[in-house]
Image (cartoon, rainbow, N blue to C red):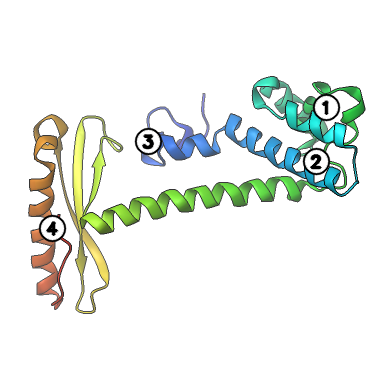
Amino acid sequence: MTSRISDSLGFAHLWGTAELRAVFDEPARVQGWLDVIAALARAQAAEGLIPVEAATAITAHARVDLLDLAEIGEQTRATGHSTLGLIRVFQAVLPESAREHVYAHATVQDVTDTWTGLALRRVGAVLRRDLTEARRRGYAVNRGESEVGVISVAAPIRDVTGRVVAAISVAGPAERLEPFELRLAQTTMECAAMISRRHGFRGTVSAV
């Protein structure tokens, strides 16, 4: 059972994509934290702060599939600490000689904030990719992301300065419209251009 609409089986598709959920879901987040912990250990070993053997063991075992996520949750609740549950469960799978060197001289923020920054960089890359593609084509397309079996295209409406102030979209059954996506996009862009001209825009618009 989920408690957040972004995790809802019925509504999650309205709040994100499978590509980005794969960045933020529980296994991916824990793996991201482990990656940071392993990178920290290697950096510390390079500076002589922890043994090289310990860093090697930490890196080799920094795999989410080796850990019990339910136990991490249990330990997190027991300690009241945001990452101590992970550290304890991770230490349990390590050789004893490496355990004390996990997360050494680091704070919670060193791990979680680093992962968050890396995750947001991934989000930014995906957003830039999709926006760049939409700008290149002159329209955006939704192929069943909001509703299964439905395709929609949208084109920007510009004001007199050329700034995008709105958009117009058309949607319908994918089985009927998908074969004519380019034609539908062209018509939508023409309508958007007409509306833009009525708002004083005199520039040119991208062609399909």
Identified at 43% across, 37% down, the residue is 19
Q: Hey, what amino acid is under mark 1?
A: Gln
Identified at 86% across, 22% down, the residue is 95
Q: Earlier in the sequence, mark 2 or mark 3?
A: 3
Q: CA distance from mark 2 to mark 3?
A: 38 Å
Q: Are marks 2 and 3 in contact (CB under 8 Å)?
A: no
In the rendered image, residue 185, in percent from the top left (x then y), is placed at: 13, 50
Reading the image, the residue beneath label 4 is 189
Residue 38 appears in the rendering: yes
Q: Hey, what amino acid is under mark 4?
A: Met
Reading the image, the residue beneath label 2 is 41
Q: CA distance from mark 1 to mark 2?
A: 13 Å
Q: CA distance from mark 4 to mark 2?
A: 53 Å
Q: Earlier in the sequence, mark 4 or mark 1?
A: 1
Q: Earlier in the sequence, mark 1 or mark 2?
A: 2
Q: Can you say which quadrant of the picture contains the C terminus? A: bottom left
